[in-house]
Image: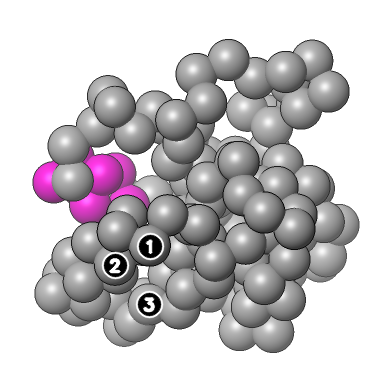
Amino acid sequence: MSTILIVEDEPITLDVLSLKLRNEGFEVFTAKNGEEGLQNALKKHPDLILADIIMPIMDGTKMIEEIRKDEWGKSVPIIVLTNLSRVSSSSGGIKRNVSHYLLKTDWKLRELIDKIKEELAK
């Protein structure tokens, strides 16, 4: 069973994603901010991370940078699912550090699940 860490500060989005992924047979861990996401990632080593960018305490960009510094974290697939369509110049490297950068408004839940399964099959 593949494990997925969802790092998302919007409770409804977090609940929907968690429920759907569990129903698809994944083991799911969650975090409500980047700091908690970083701690969970480094402790639990999920098979894939699904992360937002704009979050409290530590944003997704910083969290991903920190994960990529870890030996395990250098290769874990990370899918960004965010409302942020434009990436600021200070976080422009984020798209190079992730498997996919997806806008929430552009993806249906079924398509996201398929993208996750595709990424895990690599």
Q: Which residue is mark 1?
A: 11
Q: Give the quadrant of the N terminus.
A: bottom left
Secondary structure of residue under mark 1: helix
Q: Which residue is mark 3?
A: 28
> In whole angstroms, how far apart are the C-alphas of marks 1 and 2?
6 Å
- At label 3, the amino acid type is Val
Q: Nearer the viewer, residue 83 or 109?
A: 83
Secondary structure of residue under mark 2: helix
> In whole angstroms, how far apart are the C-alphas of marks 2 and 3?
11 Å
- At label 1, the amino acid type is Pro
Secondary structure of residue under mark 3: strand
Q: 10 Å neighbourhood of mark 3: few (<14), some, or many (≥20)?
A: some
Q: Which residue is mark 2?
A: 15
Q: Reply above or below: 71 against 114.
A: below
Residue 24 — which label?
Answer: none
Which residue is found at the position 50% from the left and 57% from the top? 9
- Residue 24 in the image, given as x and y percentages of width and height: 16, 70
Q: Earlier in the sequence, mark 2 or mark 3?
A: 2
- At label 2, the amino acid type is Asp
Q: Reply above or below: 20 against 119.
A: below
> In whole angstroms, how far apart are the C-alphas of marks 3 and 1?
15 Å
- Residue 66 in the image, given as x and y percentages of width and height: 82, 56
Instruction: Please report contact status of discs 1 and 2: CB closer than 8 Å, yes or no.
Output: yes
Q: Is residue 66 left or right of residue 56?
A: right
Q: Reply above or below: 85 against 82.
A: above
Q: Which residues are magenta?
A: 110-117
Q: Nearer the viewer, residue 77 or 10?
A: 10
Instruction: Please report contact status of discs 2 and 3: CB closer than 8 Å, yes or no.
Output: no
Q: Nearer the viewer, mark 3 or mark 1?
A: 1
Q: Earlier in the sequence, mark 3 or mark 1?
A: 1
